[in-house]
Amino acid sequence: MNGRYKSEELMSLEEFEAFIKLTENEDKRFELIDGNVYAMSSPSSTHADIVGYLHGTIFNFLKGKPCKAYMNLDVRLKLNDSIDNNKRNANANDKDNDVNVFIPDLFVNCNPNRIKTNYCLGAPEFIVEVVSPSTMNRDYYLKYYQYLMNGVQEYWVINHTKNRITVHTPEFIKEYTFNDKVPIKIFNGELVIDFGDLSETLKN
């Protein structure tokens, strides 16, 4: 399963945290977006290889620097202001409940005060999502809007099946292929990801 969890009511953060602690959900991962719960399926080997390559490259670049790369750590962002909060049930009136919970494949955070025990509270500087068929709409549209609206400076959507990397910033959207070398803007071009090399790695 990798899609919206069927629920008649929108969930608050408090209800979501209780839901994911249920025995039947202990080994599963979920996102909470505008009160809707989405189940996350296990990644494919190609998906894992892409994320691992990127994390390793960025991790090595950031040694001795104030920023840090994370994989699969929750990111909590303010709830989309466009949601009709009247649809939420009576338990969802606490400000701490006005939060979306995302699980990016990879992100870079440069403010250590955002990092809590189990999540990042607030927008990290850089986020990467590697799409699968079941997450494509969320990654390209819903998360794009939520991430940039909340202050993410750079958001990459990687689609290996379509040979495409889409780079989103507040200033531009630019597309690359797996033959390109793609600079990470937040590092002022000092780090460039060689997707040609990544493609060769995926063949092995």
Image (spheres, rainbow, N blue to C red):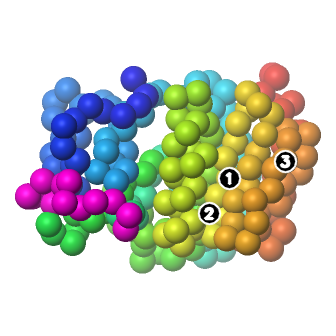
- Label 3 sits on a secondary structure element that is strand
Question: Residue 156: which numbered mark, if any?
Answer: 1
- Label 2 sits on a secondary structure element that is strand
Is residue 96 found left or right of 116 in the rendered image? Answer: left
Identify whether 165 is placed above or below 162. Answer: below
Image position, residue 167 (x, y; %): 73, 56
- In the rendered structure, are the residues bearing label 1 and label 2 in contact, judged by CB atoms less than 8 Å apart? yes
Q: What range is drawn magenta here?
A: 81-92
Image position, residue 181 (x, y; %): 89, 51
Whole-number angstrom distance, CA of label 1 to CA of label 2: 8 Å
- Label 1 sits on a secondary structure element that is strand
Q: The disc labelled 1 sits on which kind of residue?
A: Trp
Question: Which quadrant would residue 165 be assigned to in this image?
Answer: top right
Image position, residue 147 (x, y; %): 53, 61
Q: The disc labelled 3 sits on which kind of residue?
A: Tyr
Identify whether 131 is placed above or below 148. Answer: above
Is the stretch drawn in magenta largely helix, strand or loop? loop
**Badge 2: how crowded within 10 Å, few (<14), some, or many (20+)?**
many
The structure residue drawn at horizontal position 37% and vertical position 45%, both measured from the top left corner, is: 31
Queried whether the magenta region covers residue 1, the answer comes back as no
The structure residue drawn at horizontal position 85% and vertical position 41%, both measured from the top left corner, is: 177
Question: Residue 126: which numbered mark, if any?
Answer: 2
Question: Which quadrant would residue 62 be assigned to in this image?
Answer: bottom right
Residue 144 or 189: which is nearer the viewer?
144
Residue 107 or 133: which is nearer the viewer?
133
Residue 147 or 69: which is nearer the viewer?
147
**Label total for image:** 3
Is residue 8 found left or right of 120 in the rendered image? Answer: left
Judging by the rendered image, the residue that carries numbered circle 3 is 176
Whole-number angstrom distance, CA of label 3 to CA of label 2: 17 Å
The structure residue drawn at horizontal position 14% and vertical position 66%, both measured from the top left corner, is: 93
Name the quarter where the N terminus is drawn: top left
